[in-house]
């Protein structure tokens, strides 16, 4: 109906607006270039470490999981950048007026951010996968970038991109400050979670809780334990599909929470919004 058409127009309009945003383009390009460089360096170090011998499966897994283990920052950052820029530019107020309501404006904003994050996340994951394959080949090793195992990992990483985009959009709506969102996520990923995980490795009862955290879930999808290591897999965490489902639940809860807060935050005053 009319509502859906207006919604689609709004999403297309917002996507165009963000695409023209030079600051956003520069930030995303810089992030992608830095992470791709890191991926190439890591692949080169792994491949050159096996000079004259065959690369082990575990090392291939380590390299080809990069797009998810580290690359999740791309969809997360893109989605949260878009949401926070809607706030900063006052675009959200215009959306509410055009779409006649906060709920529609919120939905259009989240869909735009999640779509952009998913697409750019997929672009990065693809580039990282191909770059690693090329660096292996340049080092005189088999690239193995199209084996069923590595393609399954790549598929999982693409699915992660969609979920991390939704999580990024939800977090940005809650916090509404770009630096706080990215800083908070990085602090959690770099300092807090590894500390908890280290405690988990020392104590199996802690591990039972740790495996439900976003980091280990992300890891379980990006780099699933090989077959035949059932005990290892049970110790490490969940199967890839189960981990995706749990992350999807987190994303859903975040979006619901941010929607509830948005409703209480955005109130009309003379046709504009006060946030």
Image: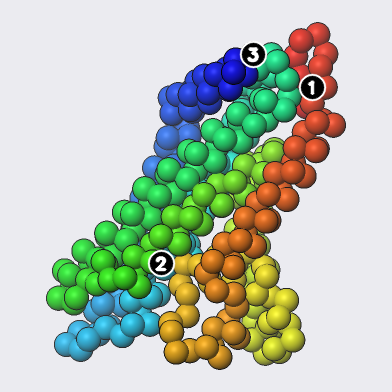
Q: How many marks?
A: 3
Left or right for 58, reference 236: left
Camera sees residue 88: no
Instruction: Tell me which residue sits at (68%, 75%) in the image.
Output: 210
* 55 left or right of 235 in image: left
- Picture quadrant where residue 95 is located: top right
**Where is mark 1, residue-wise?**
274
Q: Which mark is residue 151?
A: none
The local secondary structure at tag 3 comes to: helix
* Dot placed on the residue nearer the N-terminal end, 2 or 3: 3
Dot 3 or dot 1, earlier in sequence: 3
The residue at 34%/58% (across/down) is: 128
Q: Position of residue 198 (x, y in %)?
A: 64, 82
Front residue (pair 14, 199) = 14
- Location of residue 101 with respect to 172 vertically, above or below: above
Marks 3 and 1 close (CB-CB < 8 Å)? no
> Distance from label 2 to label 3 (Cα)?
42 Å
Which residue has dot 3 on it?
Answer: 98
Looking at this view, is 127 or 150 the one in front? 150
In this view, the residue in front, 55 or 154, is 154
Q: Earlier in the sequence, mark 2 or mark 1?
A: 2
Q: Residue at x 76, y 19 (%)?
A: 273
Q: Quadrant of the N terminus?
A: top right
Above or below, 77 against 142 in this view is: above
Depth-wise, is mark 3 or mark 1 nearer the camera?
3
Density class for disc 1 (Cα within 10 Å; few <14, some 14-19, many ≥20) is: few
């Amino acid at each position: 109906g009319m509502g859906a058409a207006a919604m689609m127009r709004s999403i297309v309009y917002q996507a165009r607006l963000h695409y023209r945003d030079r600051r956003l383009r520069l930030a995303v390009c810089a992030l992608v270039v830095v992470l791709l460089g890191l991926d190439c360096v890591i692949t080169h170090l792994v491949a050159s470490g096996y000079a004259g011998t065959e690369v082990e499966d575990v090392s291939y897994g380590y390299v080809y999981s990069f797009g998810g283990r580290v690359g999740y920052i791309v969809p997360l950052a893109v989605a949260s950048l878009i949401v926070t820029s809607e706030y900063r530019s006052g675009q959200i107020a215009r959306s509410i007026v055009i779409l006649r309501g906060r709920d529609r404006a919120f939905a259009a904003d989240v869909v735009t951010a999640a779509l952009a994050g998913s697409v750019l996340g997929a672009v990065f994951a693809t580039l990282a996968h191909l770059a690693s394959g090329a660096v292996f080949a340049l080092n005189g090793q088999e690239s193995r970038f199209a084996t069923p195992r590595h393609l399954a990992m790549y598929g999982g990483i693409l699915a992660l991109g969609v979920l991390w985009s939704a999580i990024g959009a939800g977090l940005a709506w809650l916090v509404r400050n770009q630096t706080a969102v990215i800083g908070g996520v990085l602090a959690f990923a770099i300092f807090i979670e590894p500390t908890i995980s280290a405690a988990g490795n020392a104590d199996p009862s802690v591990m039972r809780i740790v495996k439900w955290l976003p980091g280990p879930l992300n890891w379980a999808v990006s780099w699933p334990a090989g077959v035949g290591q059932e005990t290892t897999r049970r110790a490490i965490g969940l199967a890839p599909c189960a981990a995706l489902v749990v992350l999807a639940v987190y994303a859903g809860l975040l979006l619901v929470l941010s929607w509830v807060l948005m409703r209480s935050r955005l109130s009309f005053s003379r046709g504009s919004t006060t946030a």
